[in-house]
Amino acid sequence: MMISGVALYFYTKILLEKEIEEELYSNKARIERILAQEGEFIDFESILQVKKVQHQEAEQLQDTLIYDPSQNEIELFRQLSGTKIINGTNYKITVRAMIIESEDILYAIVFTFFTIIFLAFIFLFYLNKSRNEKLWKPFFTNLTKLKNFSVRSDKPLQLVDSEVLEFHELHKELKILTSKIQTDYKNLKQFTEDVSHEMQTPLAIMQAKIDTVINDGEINETQFHQFSSLQSDISRLKQLNKKLILLAKIENDQFTTNEVISLNKLINDTVLNFKELFSIDFLIEENATINVKMDFSLATVLCNNLLSNAVKHNFNNQSIDIKIFDRKLQVINAGEEMLSRPDQVFERFYKESRQKESTGLGLSIVKKICDYYHFVPTYSFETVHYSKKNRGRHIFQIDFSAYKD
């Protein structure tokens, strides 16, 4: 538009000059005819002038400035002058025409173009807006439905079709994809349930048969140790199987029954159970009350795994500290040194301990439960003094501040 505006300005200016020149030549020819017929001509002030001269002059076409008393200002004129011998008399004929000033042309073009651009913008804006709303309405409708889509639902994803080819193809592929995801989820869920049921039974049978052999059979000490080791491995395999199934259930979002749980009460109940199993002192310090809305079984697993980890890795059977304050829970146990890879402590199968009963899944389950409910688990190590020796404390903390219902 800018380039065409400049071109239009020069084109219009040249066109007007040519038209004025044609008009000047035409007027000069008329005056010559009148002089030839009547022998005299009346001047029209600054527009037409006729003079008798002695000598011939060449024809001239030029611009000139002349004062216009009617406008009380100096105007720009295009002037054509030349001599002509008519009926034996030498006449100098001068004709003038007012020129439209360049500024006026420029202002007219700029105003016209800005008006056209503004009107075109208004028209295209509302045209595109209404058209785009119509074109994109199915897309945003489907986007909303996709956001609300759940793989747990038995109903297929119902999308609105569109006349736009690309949206139609996207709609078709999304239906295929979501249908496959729902099928895969159901198969995975069924597989998890089947594994949970089918594997526990043969493992229990194997353990029972080993118990029978140990109790009823005549075996030597070597065989007894071998059977005991096998029984321990089966027990560990059962425990590993349960934990993996629990992780799968959490990832598949199968815990939907939430209730308000007093974390203080749950911790105290868990500590009572642990005191019956382990001869370790548990020191509970409660400076706040924490209530969270979550599945009770997951809350129990969370507390059990935290305390179980502290008991397994506690140094020299020292007391385990449990602190509840400012929507935070800390479980602290004694340790010889900081973990070599503290950033991986919540990852699956990460173990620094060589204890056979450790599966390496306890803290990863804690992390998975925390992620599920937007809790924040952290690990830190603090150096303290035990009997004139530098020891330390492993601190596992759960921050419930970011908890959402």
Image: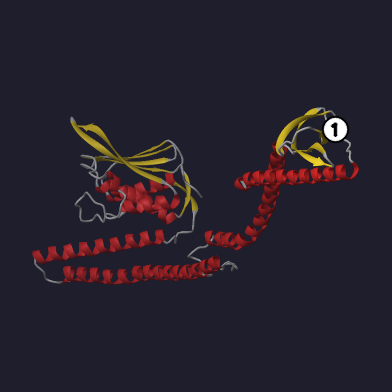
Badge 1 marks a residue whose secondary structure is loop
- Residue most extreme to the right: 38
**Three-letter amino acid code at disc 1?**
Glu
* Residue 241 shown left or right of residue 69 in the figure: left
Vertical order, 45 against 2 (above or below): above
Vertical order, 274 against 391 (above or below): below
Say how many tags the image has: 1
Vertical order, 128 against 204 (above or below): above
Kindly indicate the quadrant of the structure image that contains residue 377: top left
The residue that mark 1 highlights is 45
**Image x and y of residue 299, in percent:** 41, 52
**Image x and y of residue 221, in percent:** 9, 64
Is residue 237 at all visible to an observer of this figure? yes
Question: What's the residue at 11%, 71% (across, down)?
Answer: 218
Residue sitting nearer the eye, 216 or 130: 130
Question: Pointer 1: residues within 10 angstroms few (<14), some, or many (20+)?
Answer: few
Kindly indicate the quadrant of the structure image that contains residue 339: top left
Is residue 387 at all visible to an observer of this figure? no
Residue sitting nearer the eye, 290 or 14: 14
**Image x and y of residue 76, in percent:** 74, 33
Question: What's the residue at 29%, 45% (across, down)?
Answer: 343
Residue sitting nearer the eye, 87 or 67: 87
Question: What's the residue at 49%, 69% (across, down)?
Answer: 173
Residue sitting nearer the eye, 284 or 376: 376
**Image x and y of residue 121, in percent:** 67, 50
* Residue 320 shown left or right of residue 260 in the figure: left
Question: What's the residue at 22%, 42% (across, down)?
Answer: 315
Kindly indicate the quadrant of the structure image that contains residue 348: bottom left
Colour scheme in use: secondary structure
